Amino acid sequence: MRPVHTTALIAGTLALGLSACTVSVRPNLGLQVSGSNLISGLKPDRGEGSTYAVGESVRILVGTRSAGYITLVALQSNGYASVLARNVYVQPGTTAFPRAQDGVAFTVAPPRGVQRVRAIFTRVRPSSDLVVSGTYDSSGFNTVTNAYVTSYAQEDRDVQETFFYIR
């Protein structure tokens, strides 16, 4: 049995060491429709949780294990949602969005804060477009994206989310 003073010393050392750590809180994803692992990776080009200044460009890297269709949806810190890419066919591997052939750039703009990006993957071409317009709380955002993918078989769809900060 370990003496009490040794346990207290270990606990005190851990507390001191951990007090110097920075804690990052990831947004509550609430993704209940992700039933497979078709998306192998999703992150901004500087990495998840990275920071971008207003006016900088960001690229979103999406890795897939199968050919299929990607839709990217962004949710700003003020709750405004928009579609960044809609039903884009991708081969297995990593695709950077925007792609060169898209002729656009994802330029970071206000509002400052957490920017969430959700990737929706289906193996079959979607029969409808995901329509988001207006402002959503997390629950409403989840409801809209969940409703969009539930018509696809669980093994043919995947939904993942990443985030970055705008300063």
Image: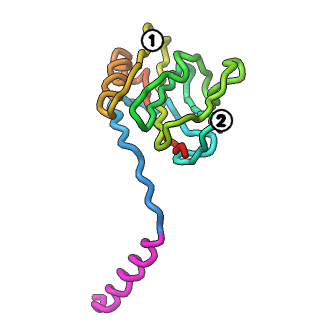
Provide residue 82's location: percent of width, then percent of height: 47, 23
Q: Which residue is mark 1?
A: 129
Residue at 52%, 45% in the rendered image: 165
Residue 146 location, quadrant: top left
How far apart are the two marked residues, 1 and 2, measured between alpha carbons?
A: 26 Å
Name which residue lies at 64% across and 26% down. 98
| Circles 1, 2 touching at the beta carbon (< 8 Å) | no
Mark 2, residue position: 57
Magenta segment = 1-20
Q: What amino acid is at disc 2?
A: Ser
87 sits left or right of 133 in the view: right
Count of numbered badges drawn on the protein: 2
Q: Position of residue 40 (x, y in %)?
A: 53, 35
What colour scheme governs how the chains and residues are painted in the rendered image of this protein?
A: rainbow
Q: Where is residue 141, by image quadrant?
A: top left
| Residue at disc 1, secondary structure | loop
Judge whether 66 appears above or below 10 on screen. Answer: above
